[in-house]
Image (spheres, helix red, strand yellow):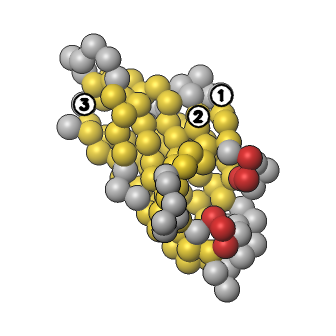
Amino acid sequence: QVQLVESGGGLVQPGGSLRLSCAASGSIFSINDMAWYRQAPGKARELVATETRRGITNYRDSVKGRFTISRDTAKNTVSLQMNSLKPEDTAVYYCYAEILLHGRLKPYGYWGQGTQVTVSS
């Protein structure tokens, strides 16, 4: 019923930039928070950045000043601009959205399939 499709991952050198995008589709009535998470090998999944429906953003400390989350509420999309990338940013990045479907009473969380970001020289 709902799909979150990510794009934009890849290999980049330290100091480089990448932009991740995520598009939500399906029987969507509204979307509350949208977010990006990441999971490095052998580590737990961690929150990278969130943006509420009203545009309030929040970032984990290690990416503040380097990453920017932005969403288009009308298009149900969210992106993550990543600058000054470091090897420790290497991970699979996941899009997350809290979505209220048509005909439902409460929203549920949905995940994208993940996209690999590798920062290496």
Classify mark 2: residues with Cα within 10 Å, few (<14), some (14-19) or many (20+): many
Real-space Cα separation, disc 1 to disc 3, in angstroms = 25 Å
**Label 1: few (<14), some (14–19) or many (≥20) C-alpha neighbours in 10 Å:** few
Question: Residue pushed farthest top?
Answer: 105
Q: Which mark is residue 56?
A: 1
Q: Residue at x 56, y 28 (%)?
A: 52
Q: Secondary structure at mark 1?
A: loop
Q: Is residue 25 visible?
A: yes
Residue matched to label 2? 51
Which residue: 58% across, 38% down? Answer: 50
Element at label 3: loop
Which is in the foreground here, disc 2 or disc 3?
2
In this rendering, does residue 79 appear at all? no
The vertical placement of 35 against 30, above or below, is below
Task: List the single residue furthest toward the front.
Answer: 42
Q: Which numbered disc flags the more N-terminal residue, 1 or 2?
A: 2
Element type at marker 2?
A: strand
The answer to the question of whether label 1 and label 2 lie on touching residues, with beta carbons closer than 8 A, is: yes
Residue occupying image coordinates x 50% and y 36%? 34
Q: Nearer the viewer, residue 44 or 65?
A: 44
Q: Position of residue 22 (x, y in %)?
A: 44, 50
102 or 36: nearer the viewer: 36
Which residue in the protein does label 3 denote? 27
Instruction: Kindly report which numbered mark, 1 or 3, lies closer to the viewer in this rendering.
Output: 1
Image coords of residue 38 (percent x, y): 52, 55
The amino acid beneath tag 2 is: Glu
> Residue 93: x, y in percent?
49, 58
- Mark 1 to mark 2 CA distance (whole Å): 5 Å
